[in-house]
Image (cartoon, helix red, strand yellow):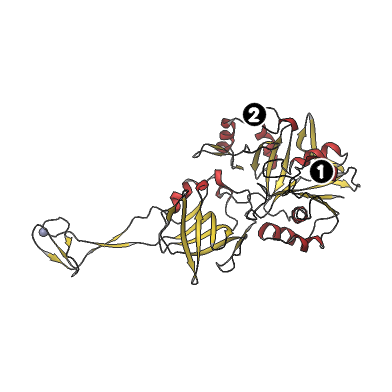
Amino acid sequence: MPILGIDDTDSRTEMCTTYLTIEILKNSNLDLIGFPRLVRLNPNIPLKTRGNAAISLTLGRGEGKKEVVGRIGEESINSFKRYREERMDIDIMSIIEKFSPKEKDTNPALVIGREKNDENFYWDAVREFVDYAKVVDKVKGDFWSINGQVGIVGANAAISWPERNPTYELIAYLEREMWSGSHFVDDSSSKLIERTFVDTFDNFDFKNNYNAIRPTTKTPVLFGIRSIEPTRLIDYERYIKSEPFSSFVIYKTNQATDDHLVERTIEESKLYSSSIIRGFVSSEPSWSRGGILSFDIESNGKKIRVVAMEPTKEFRTLLSKLTRGDEVRVYGGITKVGFINIEKIEVISVSRIKEIRPPLCPKCKTRMESVGRSGGFRCRKCGARSNKGEERTENREIAPGFYEVPIIARRHLARPLKLGIVK
Ligand SMILES: [Zn+2]
């Protein structure tokens, strides 16, 4: 059975690799086996397209029970569990060529294999910076590419994804002539599903009034709804009030899996990797130009700067409540040497700041004042003296627990706290 992996058919401003699923299904007489898969890769790699998404499809002659996983026009897209092997009946590369933008940084690639590939290809592509030359020799199956072979890394990773803790996304697509321009997706229906259903996530950011199911750039995608429960997604699609769309399909995806994150020390956290680093806050959080909030954490004598950029909104204010001595685990990406771009934090313990202040005068019940350098305290009214100050534990405005960036700043791979912690 052909398993297809496709990557890098979009640019920063155009197309979306996932749309090829629709075009392939429209043109092929083969059936979809299982869900189509949407696989997000290392989000820290520079020059990558917006979502850094690859897709994988298994095609064959479906047999037995079928399930509806989408629609093209008036026709259902069926998915089968059982199948008979068939040869590919269309030229996928010509479809890729037709739809991918002709740009320097768009390097479309297609891998057609017969089975899933070694999952390490996936882990490397979601966690590291992979040299494509090292992958090209090891690809099982046939591959094609346009404009260089960089796209092979993602295409091969997509057919190597082991599907651990998957989530699902229903993506609705516009007709090609509608791709540019602005589109209508009603906010209130997005708010409704966010509020009502526990299995769906990242639909609407109430604090920032941001409708997250609607993309903000020029793309074939009209909206996308995410859930951990694929069978519910078709119901949610009916809740969304929007302009008409021509097709939709449900993907199984590695979004919201935290697959990119690895528990590492500061030393081990290399450029472009994503780490979970445990340490103590070692400098007071401070604001800098452009609304950036940052502070240092330290562990085993090493230091790294934790950075929360402007788009992380109110999360920065929360982080500003941290102070020296707090123990934390920081989840984020190393986009610059010495810096970790924060996605999530576990505050393990908050330090109890003790402050010594002048005691109350036992006679007058007013607060004494400090007597310069010599130490001690004195009552301004009656002149009584005391050497012992009053110890005070400051009320902290942050408590131990997990905190995350708001929906508006969430990366595709980052697991919302709503879905529970897996790492
Ligand atoms: Zn007094």
- Circle 1 SS class: helix
Q: Nearer the viewer, residue 416 or 288?
A: 288
The picture places residue 201, in percent across and down from the top left corner, at 60, 43
Query: Which mark identifies residue 223?
Result: none
The 10 Å Cα crowd at callout 2, few under 14, some 14 to 19, many 20 or more, is some
Using the rendered view, name the quadrant where residue 136 is placed. Answer: bottom right
The residue identified by callout 1 is 97
Name of the residue lying farthest toward the bottom: 301
Q: Nearer the viewer, residue 143 or 161?
A: 143
Q: Nearer the viewer, residue 149 or 416?
A: 149
With 389 as the anchor, is 383 left or right in this view? Answer: left
Rendered view: 213 above or below 288: above
The 10 Å Cα crowd at callout 1, few under 14, some 14 to 19, many 20 or more, is some
The residue identified by callout 2 is 242
Q: Is the CB of the residue bearing disc 1 within 8 angstroms of ligand 1?
A: no
The picture places residue 377, in percent across and down from the top left corner, at 17, 64
Which residue is found at the position 83% from the left and 36% from the top?
26
Mark 2–mark 1 distance (CA, rounded to whole Å) = 30 Å
Residue type of the residue flagged with mark 1: Glu
Rendered view: 270 above or below 228: below
Q: Is the CB of the residue bearing disc 2 within 8 angstroms of ligand 1?
A: no
Residue type of the residue flagged with mark 2: Ser
- Circle 2 SS class: loop
The picture places residue 308, in percent across and down from the top left corner, at 50, 53
The picture places residue 263, in percent across and down from the top left corner, at 59, 63
